[in-house]
Amino acid sequence: MDPSTPVTIFIAENGNRQGPYSIHTLKEMIRRGDISLSDKAWYEGCAEWTRIRDMPELLDAIIPPLPPPQEGISPHAPTTSDEGTKRGKGVALTSAVLGMFALIPGLWLAFQLGLKVWEPNNDVRLVFMLSCLAIPGIICGHIARRYLRSSPQRYGGSQFALTGLSTGYLSILITLGFTLPACARAKERAQTLTCANNMKQLILASLTWAIDNDSRFPFNVSKSQGGSMELCLPGPNGFDYNPFTHLMIMSNELETTHILVCPADSSRRWSVNWQSLQSSNVSYLIHVGTKVDQRYPDEVLAVCPIHGHAVLCNGRVQLGPRFRHLADDPSFKKYTKPLPASLLHSPQRP
């Protein structure tokens, strides 16, 4: 059927006959969606009403045939777009470059850590720089992979995308390997510093209390004189089973119960007030005895069972074996130094 030939066509829609229409009008109605190829049509010469899609002579007039395929190109495969190929390869190449730039410094740091010439807490900022390169690389890699899944023939760079994703995720793993130990060490160092400060406050409070009590600590002063000598319950190693009894005597000097609990001691909770203080609210072990006073400056007054720190009667905090390397750290020096002799009141007793 020639589209230029004037033909009047009737359409049956929902049981009602509509028309007549010309071929040109019928094409416009199909394009607008007013009718579909499932509707029945009839024109002069047809034996009966037939669906439009079953009338090849009418379909040829309404829908022009596709042009013949070019040589070497499948009629069902989309043609490759140079612009799409460049875009896909560009994103994939960006992913690979960012991933490699993030991975190379990470491998170098891992090598340095293996030689024990670099500590994770020396420069954590350098570790976080790896993730600043790796994360954009991973994002670009996933974008490139999405392009490839949507149209493999149009976009390229699959190898670059895989390289960017693998190196990016590997860099993230290296970053976690550095930051997690660094965070753990930073937390441990902070807890150690707080513990040393607590013990320093403990000895300062004891020395302050001793000023008004003949330079003696509470456990060497009888109850009748305001001490806690009769409440001493020392164990075989000289540490009292009930340290809170001596600490309550110094409540005015200590001021708060918070310093009696080591921050790394998860089994102890500080007391809300001095009246409810119990052994479960004290982390530190108190060493009692007649030799624990300022006549013996190197005698141990208290010990932290968590860190192994010990505070001596001369006011010096001796760090535990695992933390001896921090003794020269500026943050710890004020705790590891003994108090000036002018602040110590040595008793003149036999």
Image (cartoon, grey):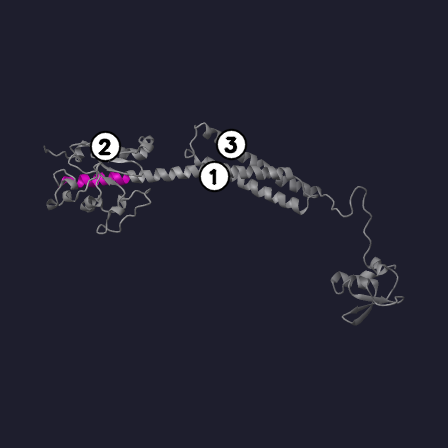
201 inside magenta stretch: yes
Please identify the quarter of the rendering in which residue 304 is found: top left
Give the CA distance from mark 3 to mark 1.
Answer: 13 Å
Label 3 packing within 10 angstroms: few (<14), some (14-19), many (20+): some
Q: Which residue is mark 3?
A: 107
Secondary structure of the residue carrying numbered label 3: helix
Which residue is nearer to you in this view: 70 or 54?
A: 54
64 inside magenta stretch: no
Horizontally, residue 183 falls left or right of residue 296, namely right
Numbered label attached to residue 176: 1
Secondary structure of the residue carrying numbered label 1: helix
Horizontally, residue 225 falls left or right of residue 262, namely left
Give the CA distance from mark 2 to mark 3.
Answer: 45 Å
Horizontally, residue 287 falls left or right of residue 69, namely left
Give the CA distance from mark 1 to mark 2.
Answer: 41 Å
- What amino acid is found at the position of numbered circle 2 in the picture? Pro
Whether residue 288 is visible here, answered yes or no, is yes
Residue shown at 61% from the left, 39% from the top: 162
Q: Nearer the viewer, mark 1 or mark 2?
A: 1
Image location (x, y in percent) of residue 244: 22, 45
Locate the N terminus and report the quarter of the image it occupies.
Answer: bottom right
Residue shown at 42% from the left, 37% from the top: 182
For marks 2 and 3 on the same chain, the one whose residue lies earlier in the sequence = 3
Image location (x, y in percent) of residue 41: 82, 66
Numbered label attached to residue 338: 2
Label 1 packing within 10 angstroms: few (<14), some (14-19), many (20+): some
- What amino acid is found at the position of numbered circle 3 in the picture? Leu
Whether residue 128 is visible here, answered yes or no, is no
Please identify the quarter of the rendering in which residue 349 is found: top left
Instruction: Please state the extent of the stretch shown in magenta in the rendering.
Output: 197-212
